[in-house]
Image (cartoon, rainbow, N blue to C red):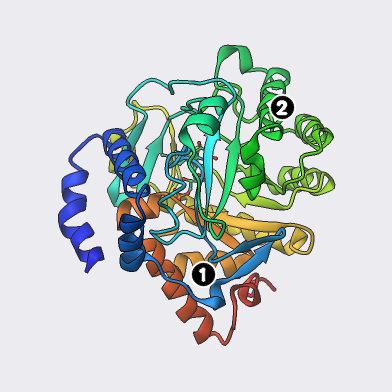
Amino acid sequence: MVKTLYKYILKPILFRFDPEFIHNLFTSRGRLLGRFRLTRSILKNAFRYDSPSLHQEIAGIKFKNPVGLAAGFDYDGKLTEVLESIGFGFQSIGTVTYSPYEGNSKPRLARLPKSKSLLVNKGFKSDGIEKVLNRNVREWNETFKVGISIGATNSKECSTPKAQIEDIIKSFSYLKSHKLLERFSYLELNISCPNVLGSGSLADTENLEDVLSKIKELGIDKPIFVKFQLEIEWEKARKLIEIIIKYGVEAIIIANLLKQREGSEIRKEELESVKNLKGNFSGKPTFNLSNELIEKTYREFGDRIKIVGLGGIFNAEDAYEKIKRGASLVQLITGMIYEGPQVIGDINRGLERLLRKDGYKSVDEAVGSAVK
Ligand SMILES: Cc1cc2nc3c(=O)[nH]c(=O)nc-3n(C[C@H](O)[C@H](O)[C@H](O)COP(=O)(O)O)c2cc1C
């Protein structure tokens, strides 16, 4: 019912407006709905699906279900109160940067509906860590798990690896002495945003080692997750993952946006329509590449690190594919925008059905089951 309503009535209207305007509208309405127990409970009844077979403990964190909101949707931390009601098990706030940044120049978001993708060029638009933690983020239930993604401020001063690392460490230090730290379940280090100045420089063995060792020196008692890039040669990925494991990172999030245009799974006419726009792609065109990287990572490192899989999840089958390739948890953004907010509950319900069909009692039994 909600699905039909979203697909045939709401979406055609929403998709007539500028994507960023709609995103801001949803964020402000979502924030408001999250304020009151009554609206939260109405949403929960309409959307959320719970089942013990979806529970898992990863990195000491007890997740009620494996479906999370990825970094990039609630980038200023305004939706912590409402996301559990619409069905999510967890979320990554952010990416948050130390200093505020108004974002890359507009337009920085475009829809490619035939390719089930979005073109993204926000470049870490952020209110900055101080405002996010002190003014934006509101309380959330203990049962809902919240992490915060940290990246380097997107500015000229922060475009060298050294400056980026210093900036990231300033954010982690700020978090360390903040009262909200206790409430966060994990801290996410973003080394993979393709649309910022100096992009990719932290995905280098020396710089990655430098930033992770400095984070470790801070002695923050929280699991660290690292958000990885999508397009990377396996030899290079392997070296980076070794470093990530060496520094005790609990989970690797695979993966970020797609840079490649030619030869990708984006429809030709839609590529043509955005040829003058900068940015990188989310959604379906990332699905297969992310699955391949998840599988390779699981095959070689599955016994040493947990995987959070994302990229192009639109339904339970897509999520289950990532789980069978080795992901313990999944995240999404684009699928929710195209399918509607009920998709989170639908994915959880569908996952339970798929687990049962394959004879598994819980998600963790299915993790990596397709990897020989
Ligand atoms: C509008 C938008 C903004 C994003 N911003 C961020 C970000 O700030 N940090 C980050 O790590 N990833 C960001 N991403 C990437 C997503 O977290 C995710 O890796 C990617 O979109 C693939 O997942 P999806 O196909 O479910 O959207 C963004 C994606 C979108 C669509």
- Identify residue for label 1: 320
- Outermost residue toward the front? 37
Q: Are marks 1 and 2 in contact (CB under 8 Å)?
A: no
Residue 307 position, x and y percent, is: 65, 57
Left-right relation of 362 to 76: right
Task: Say which quarter of the image contains residue 341.
Answer: bottom left
* Mark 2 lies within 8 Å of ligand 1 (Cβ measured): no
- Point 37% across, 29% down: residue: 108
Residue type at the position of mark 2: Ile
The quadrant of the picture occupied by the C terminus is bottom right
| Total numbered labels | 2
- Point 44% across, 58% down: residue: 313
**Residue 63 shows up from this direction:** yes
Tag nearer the camera, 1 or 2? 2
Front residue of 133/216: it is: 133
- Point 67% across, 66% down: residue: 57
Task: Say which quarter of the image contains residue 165.
Answer: top right
- Identify residue for label 2: 169
